[in-house]
Amino acid sequence: MAEEHGSLLDLNDFDEEAYKKESEEIQKLYYLTKDNCTFARTKGGFVSLTCGEKTYERVNLYRTFPLTDPDKYISVREADEKAKEIGIIADLDDLDKEQAQMICEQLKLRYFTPIIEKIIDVKDEYGHAYFHVKTTYGVCRFTTHMGGDAVVSLSESRVMFTDLDGNRYEIPDIYTLTAAERKKLDLFI
C-alpha cells in the first residue's frame, strides 16, 4: 500500500531518537542574560542575537505577558515561519542598559497601542463600529466588528479595542472620559 500512495510516511525513515532529542530541546527553557548573549542592531533596523558561537542574523521578540508584565519574560524567536524559540529574557534588567533599550524599541513597534484620550464619535452600522477618536498620536478613525473579541475589558476601567486590521487601541481608565464620551461607549463595553 505504501508503494501505491507515495505520500504515506515510510516508517523505516522515522528516526525515533532524533524525534526524542528534538522534543527535549523544545522543552528546555534557556534564559538569555548579558552573561550569555549579545543583542545588536542590524543595518535594516532589526535585532540580531549572538549566543556563544551561534549568531541569528534577525530575531523576533514577543511579550509573554503583554498586558500584565510587559518588561518580563520576553520570548526571543527565530525570524522565520516556524518562529522557534531561542530563549527567554526573564527581565530586561538582566541585559546591558543599551541592549535593553534596543529591545524596548522593538517591542514598542510590535505592540504599538495608542491610548485613546477622547471619544469624538462612534457609529454602529451593519455589524461594525466606526470610531473617531483622539489618541496619544493624534486624531484617527478605526473600525471594529461588533461583538467577538474586538473590545476586551481588561479590568473594570481598562478597555482594549482591536480594529479590522489588527491594530490595538487602549483606554487605560474609562472614568477619565467625560460622561458623554462614556455614554457613546455603552453599546461596546
Image (tube, helix red, strand yellow):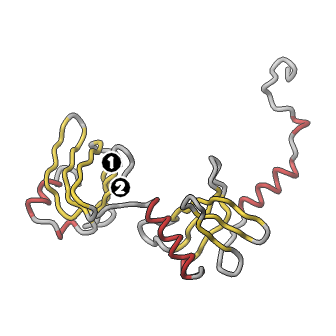
Q: Residue at x 48, y 71 (%)?
A: 104
Q: Nearer the viewer, residue 54 or 187?
A: 54
Residue projecting furthest to the front: 43
Q: Amino acid at mark 2?
A: Arg
Front position in the image: 181 or 142: 142
For label 2, the crowd category at 10 Å Cα-Cα, with few meaning under 14, some 14 to 19 and many 20 or more, is: some
What is the x, y in percent for residue 165?
37, 45
Q: Which mark is residue 163?
A: 1
Q: Is residue 178 left or right of residue 132?
A: left
Position of residue 125 relative to residue 25, above or below, is above
Name the secondary structure under disc 1. Answer: loop
Q: Identity of the amino acid at label 1? A: Asp
Q: Earlier in the sequence, mark 2 or mark 1?
A: 1
Q: Provide residue 22's location: percent of width, then percent of height.
A: 79, 55
Drawn side of residue 28 relative to residue 155, left or right: right
In the picture, the quarter occupied by the N terminus is: top right
Judged from the image, the secondary structure of the residue bearing numbered disc 2 is strand
Residue 8's place in the image compared with 30, above or below, is: above
Q: Residue 98 at x, y = what percent? A: 55, 79
How far apart are labels 2 and 1 at the CA level?
7 Å
Using the image, tell me which numbered label, if any, was put on residue 168: 2
- Asked if marks 2 and 1 touch (Cβ < 8 Å), the reply is yes
Q: Is residue 136 left or right of residue 100?
A: left
